[in-house]
Structures are given as C-alpha cells and as structure tokens.
Image: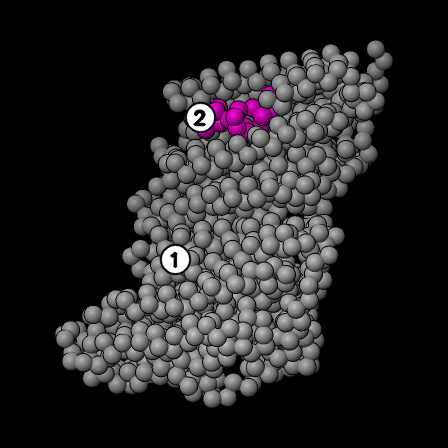
Amino acid sequence: MNFALSDLMPLLPEVFLLAAVCGILILDLFLGEDQRYITYILTLATLAGCGWLTFSTATGVTVYTMHGMFVDDLLSDSLKLILYFTVAISLVYSREYIRLRGMFQGEYFTLILFATLGMMVMISANHFLTLYMGLELLSLSLYALVALQRDSAIASEAAMKYFVLGALASGMLLYGMSMVYGTTDSLEIPRIALVLQADIGNRMVLIFGLVFIVAGLAFKLGVAPFHMWLPDVYHGAPTAVTLFIGTATKIAAFAFTIRILAQGLQMLSPDWQQMLAIMAVLSMAVGNIAAIAQANFKRMLAYSTISHMGFLLLGLLAADSAGYSASMFYVLAYVLTGLGSFGMIMLLSRQGFEADRLEDLKGLNQRNPWYAFILLLLMFSLAGLPPTIGFYAKLAVLQAVVHAGYTWLAVVAVIFSLIGAFYYLRIVRLMYFEKPTDMHPIMPPADMQVLLSANGLAVLGLGMLPQPLMALCAYAMERSL
Amino acid sequence: MLAGYPLLSLAVWLPICAGILVLATGSERNAPLARWIALLGSVLAFAVTLPLYLRFDAATANMQFVEFTAWIPTFHINYHLGVDGISMPFVLLNSFTTILVVIAGWQVIQNKTSQYMAAFLIMSGLINGVFVALDAMLFYVFFEAMLIPLFLVIGIWGGPRRVYAAVKFFLYTLLGSLLMLVAFIYLHFESGGSFEIIDYYALPLSLPVQILLFVAFFLAFAVKVPMWPVHTWLPDAHVEAPTGGSVVLAAITLKIGAYGFMRFNLPITPDASHYMTGFIITISLIAVVYISLVALVQADMKKLIAYSSISHMGFVTLGIFLFNNIGMEGALLQMISHGFISAAMFLSIGVMYDRMHTRQIADYGGLVNRMPVFAAFLMLFSMANAGLPGTSGFVGEFMVILAAIKVNFWYAFAAATTLIFGAAYTLWMYKRVIFGAITNPEVAKLTDINPREFGFLAVLAALTLAMGIYPQPVTNVMHVSVDNLLAHVAQSKLP
C-alpha cells in the first residue's frame, strides 16, 4: 500500500490528540494528588492545540485521504472547532463538581479526550468502517465515564443500561451497513452515493438495511422510540458526564447522520424521510409530554433532549441543503443552551448536594438574580421563544419543513412546542415566583462564573444577531455536500 | 433636524436600555435611584415619540419614519420599521402609559423595585416594537418577547393566585402566536421569499388558503383582544396582576390584538375576512352583551373592570369587521379612549387597594365621606366607562353604533344595549363603593389621595375629557390610513 506523509496532513489534529492523550496518560502516573491540576491544564491545552491545528490546516476545499477512509471538508472543520470549544467549556464547568466528588483524576480527562477523538473521527469519516470505529471509541469512553463513580448504584445501573442498549444499537447499525454493502459493493460513502445514483439496485435489500441503519442512528441521537436509555443515563451519570453526553456528543451524532443519510443515502431520501417523520412526531410527543411529569431537573432535560432531537429530525427530513443547514444551526443552538443548563446545575451544586431536583431551583431569583436571569434565558431558548437563539433554530427548521411541503408537520411541531413551553415555564416559575427553601450562598469559581454568564448572554446575543452563525451553517453545508 | 434621527428605533430601544440600566442598580438598597432612573427613562422615551405625532404627515397612507436594515439575510428578515396613521397613536399611548405605571408603582412596590420598573420599561420598548415592525418576523419577535416581562410581572408581584394566572396567560397567548408563525413561514414561500408585511398585501391567495391563514392570525389576535370565548385568561390575569400590570394589560396589550386584525387579517386575507365577517360580528356582539351581564354580577372591582374591558373590546372588533369608514375609525378611537379610561379605572382601584388591601366591593361603602376628591375623579371615569357623551368613551361607541346601523339595524340594536348595561354595572359599582353609610371601620380611617395620585388621575381626567369633546386631532391622522386599509379590504385577492 502506497503511503505518503502528506496523506497525514488532513488528520493532523487527530494524530496530535492521540499523541497528547498518550502523553497525558503517562505523565498523570507521576503526578501527586495535589498536582492533578496539571492534567487538567494539559487537557485544555491539548484541545487548544487541536483547535489551532484544525484552524490552520483548514483549506475550505474537500480533501479525501487514507484511500477514501477520511475526509476533511468545511463541515468537518467547523464542527470540530465547535466540538473542541464545547468540550473545553464543559471541562471548565465540571472542574469544581468533579473535584468535590473525587473524580478529579487522570482517567476522567483521558476518557474525555478519547471520546473527543472518537467524535472527531466520526465527524471526518468518509467510510462506514471509519464511522463505526469513531462511534465505538466514543461509546466505550462514555460507558466508562458514566460508571466512573464506582460506588454509586444509580450510576452503575445507568452505565449498564447504556452499554447493553448501546451495543445492541451498534449491532443494528453494522447489520444495516452490511446490507448496504451487499447491494452497492462499497463502504465508501461518496461511492455508495454514486452507485445508487447510477442504479438503485436491489431496492428491497437496501430498504431493509436502511431501516437498521436509521434505527441505529436514532438510538445514538436518542429519538423515540429508541430513547429509553436517555433519561436513565442523564439522571444516573454524574452531572459533569451528563453535560458531556448532552452537548458534545450531539455534534458528533449530527455529523454521523449527515454523513450516512445526506451524503451516502441521499438517493433513498423518500424512504428515510417517512421514517424520520414518524420518529420526529413520536419524539416530540414523548419528550414533551413525559417531561411534564418529571421532578428531577436532569431527567426533565433528558426528555427535553428527546423532543429537541425530534425537532432536529424535522430539519433533516427536508432532505435539502437548506434543511441540513437548518438542522446544523439547531444542533449548535441546542448545544449552546444545553451547556448552560447543565452548567447551571453544577453551579448550584456543592459538596454532598446535587441540586438536580426541580425544587432546588425555588426562589433562585432571591438568592441570586443574575443566575436566575441566565437560567431564564436558557429556558426560554429551549422553549424556542424570541429573542433567544432557540427561536431562530426553530424558525429555521420550520421553514425548511414548510419548504419541503410538510406544512402539517410544522403545525404538529408548534403544537408540541407549546406543550414544551409549559415545563420550561415551570422552571422560570420556581425561580421567580416561589420563596427559596435553601439559603446556601452560591459561590462558584470565577472562571465558571464568567463563562456561564457569557454562555447565557450568547444565547441572547445570538438570538438578536443570528446571521453570522446561520451563514456559517449554510456555507458549510453548501460546500460539503 | 429631527428627520435624521432614527426616531422609531429610539422609541423601541431607549426604554429597553433604560430598563437594563434600572436592573443594574441591583439590590433594594438602591431602590430610590432605580425609581428615578425609571421615571427619567420613561419620560425620555415618551419625549422621543412626540415628534412622531408632531411631524406626522396625515395626507399619506404610506409608512413614515421608515428605517430599513438587513438583519438576517439568510432568511430575508429585515429590521424594517415604520408607522402609519393606525399604528402611530398606539406608540404614543404606550409610551405615555409607561410613565403612569412608573409613577403608580412609586411607593407601592417595595419588593424587588428595580426588577419591577425594569420589566415595565423593557416591555414598553417591546410593545413599541410590535406597533412599528413592518417585517413579519420582527413583529413576531417583539410580539412574543413582550410576553416574558408581563409573565414575570404578573407572577412576581401579583395576588394570591398569581402563578396560575401567569401561566394561563402565557400559554393562551403562546398557543395563538405559534400558529401565526407557521402562517408567516407559509406566506414567506408563497411570496417568493419575503417577510415584508406590505408584500403580503398584494399577494393573490385562493379562498381556502386565505381562510386557513385567517384562522391562524385570528387565533393569535383573538386571544390577545381577547374575544369571547377565548377571553378567560384576562379576568384571572387582571385580578392577580399588580396595578401597573393591569394598566398595561388593559390599556396596551389588548390593543395589539385589534391592531393585528387591521395589519394582518384584513389586508392579507380580505376575501376570508368578508367570508368570516358574520362569525366575527356574532362573537363580538356576544362579548358586548353577554360579558356586560357577567360584569354586572362581579363582587371584585378588578374583575368587573376586566369584564368591562372585554365588552368594550367587543365594540372594537365589531367596528373593524363592519368594513366601513366610521366603524373602523370608531374602533380606533374606542381603543385609544379605552386606553385612557381602563388605565384610570385600574389606577383608581389601585388607589383604594393600597389603602384597604381588598378589592371586594362589599368591603367598601361611604368612601365619599373620607375621600371626596377621589370620589369626584372616580365619578368622571365611571361615567366615561359607561360611555357618557362628553367623555372619550362616548365618541368611539357612538361611531361604531352608527356604522352598525348602516350595515344592519339589529347589529346596532344589540351593540347599543351596552350603553344600558355599561352604565348599570359601572354606576352600580360606584354607588356601592362610594355612597351609602360607612359600614367598614377601616374605611373610616382613610385619607384622601396624595399629590402623586392626584397628578396621574388629573392628567387622565383631562385626556378623557379632551378626547370626548374634541377628538379631531386623533382622527385626523387616521383618515387616510383607514381609507387605504378599506381599499385593501374591498379588493378581492382571489387569483
């Protein structure tokens, strides 16, 4: 097999990250308990390095390398940059939380970095096997992260469920891929698209495979009816890990879906559109209705995620460039808001107190008006109300859906988002209209205060001026499809 | 010269910035500072809206003081502002009312003062935005965003059942507006990628489509007006809201619904409007007659005025859907006059509530013995609410009844009953509260209104009388715009 060093250029960030993780892993062995912050800083530095490498090697042209296994395009570059950013912010938010819970260990950071590497591979995958490898690297790291608190029964249970169901989903995905391979004779995504364009072949087998692939994707995204793992994992995992699963992995799952459905199986869009439509409606129904009954904030956000992923599918099922860029915007808006929401839970938590019940939010406006305001912005963004970014995300998706001729789906979606508004309002109600029961002062570290405030204001600021981010999404999609 | 200034942007953003500044004063320790900044901000905000009236060109129906900047080019959404004779008076009314609200809450609000004042200032800017937005999406953003401060105002400073009322208010209004969002997106594609409201006026649409769009808009605005039978959020919200909240609700936010009919329903879906007119007139008349009767039996003063507002707004929707000149102008006058009168009524109830901490009519009686000046003011406002000639309440109602007679005698007959019922419920309330012997020992300890209260009641009294005697300055600016609107309605848009 011929191999040129220049083939490695597009995957420089991945190579760097892998080398850095190995270095950190070894270095961490020699660090004492009170020097652990070095690992933390090195982890952040690694992410910054990846960011610099990705940014400086970005050419804006699509480059295939490693014999078509790997692609470096505008979509992958922009998603990766956002991914580093998300992971870094989630680390800053988690630091105090994991320190107080005895998880401030080398394993935590290396697992996070390995998961990040897995996601980068998924984002840049041009081949079904590369996709699968990235996915497994991510999933295995996540299983371990969820179970990191060994003594917590609820976390172990969550990890077990996540692992069993995750393995099942991976199996389904592989099975579906094998069916597609059987008819198209290829695992390379652009080639599959070409083969299908020329001749659809044995449609029966293809659709059969497609069903399995979509089911596997649905599991990873967490849309109904493959959502069962999500509330338990969100609830059971330490909040720092929930934050990671709830935000960063959504970027990868989105890229994953785009690579398979939009780039590989676009020719089958009439078939997967129907599947996505059903799953979208189911997700919005299950997510929004079940969220009303939750008393735990993390569980409520889990169901809210399910409904948001349903909304995301709406954008995808438009199956055109506008729809894909709308869903990309939706994912980014969701990630930004999710970061803030889970970050807020950690901000309110302290030693021996998780702050993850809804009643823990009571009277937050009296305890600290500023954070109450930030959480208010985040909740209204999740509910999709202007002038927050969540509104434009909804608008973009609805527009794509109406444009694709599914006006009825748009009507269904807005009715479910009305139901959704009810439980987001409940958070606002608890913060503003109730008296506090818990008067502990809120004293988060300074960097977290600044970042979380900036996060909340970004939700508002990007809501007032969403144009740059929207243009980026549209441009990235146009250049990469 | 003034012409160079972005007056409409100032009208929107000045109160919002003032609100943020008030918020920044922070804790209760700085409450006096918060109050003064709020007052200064609201007065300044009103001052910048004055040139809109003074420099308004009443001879054209075109949009004036237009500002245009591309905002979100990806979606063809523009920051496009402008006013015509229909929207301009509401900008002034709103900015003026905000001053009243700030003054009315001066001593009464002692809890989170800065947040209270800020909420009203920000809301004032957003409501101005609703009236001046010429881009559908911009309109929608303001329309939704103003729910947030109002939701907080009702929920934080309201009465005992405030949480229920706030959530009900929010979800009701959200239900209507979300369907409107879908309608906008649909129109966006039908018009070939435009969110300009004016572009939709010329867009040919088939009747079934028009009816669906009409229903989507109608739900959004009917909830806001509110029309029978989707009015049930209003009495709850009014009763639980603090005085300032009630004033803004009654004087301003209800008008947004009627304004929406004029800006969206009539010109965008004229054929559907004609098709649905019988239905709208029927429910308007139900509001006028039935809700008046409901008002008659209320034991709570705020609830009584809330029902009276619904009944008065029934007049407005009736006037709009008669599709003639007098009706439309009558409706507009009625809206502005109701802005003054309902504000005055709620402020008066606030004056009593601050002293007695009850709104039950039965707890009062014989107030005239202790508060003669106040009794005189309340007399005037009650008469105006009942539509006495010489007050602003009469002009609008009379014009709508005149317009109704032209269309159908029985419409006018049903509508005119309000002159009887309106007088009955308002004056009966007045009698029970003000006259008679003092039965409640608490009433015996009352003192008359202070200069602050005298100030805002006197201003409102003057305005009520002025508009009743000489409404010309208000109607003059509307004529051309109303004629233009009626021309749009008269023209079929069927392809």
Q: Secondary structure at mark 2?
A: helix
Residue A440: x and y in percent read: 33, 44
* Residue occupied by mark 1: B232
Disc number for residue A467: none
Quadrant of the image containing the N terminus of chain B: bottom right
Quadrant of the image containing the C terminus of chain B: bottom right
* In this view, A255 is above or below B367: above
Q: Secondary structure at mark 1?
A: loop
* In this view, A427 is above or below B427: above
Res B434 quadrant in image:
bottom left
Q: Residues within 10 Å of mark 2 (few under 14, many from 20)?
A: many
| Left-right relation of B299 to B487 | left
* Labels 1 & 2 near each other (Cβ < 8 A): no
* In this view, A360 is above or below A236: below
Amino acid type shown at disc 1? Thr
Residue located at (63% from left, 61% from top)? B271
Q: Which residues are magenta?
A: A216-231
Residue located at (65% from left, 55% from top)? B207
Residue A221 falls within the magenta-colored stretch: yes
Disc number for residue A232: 2
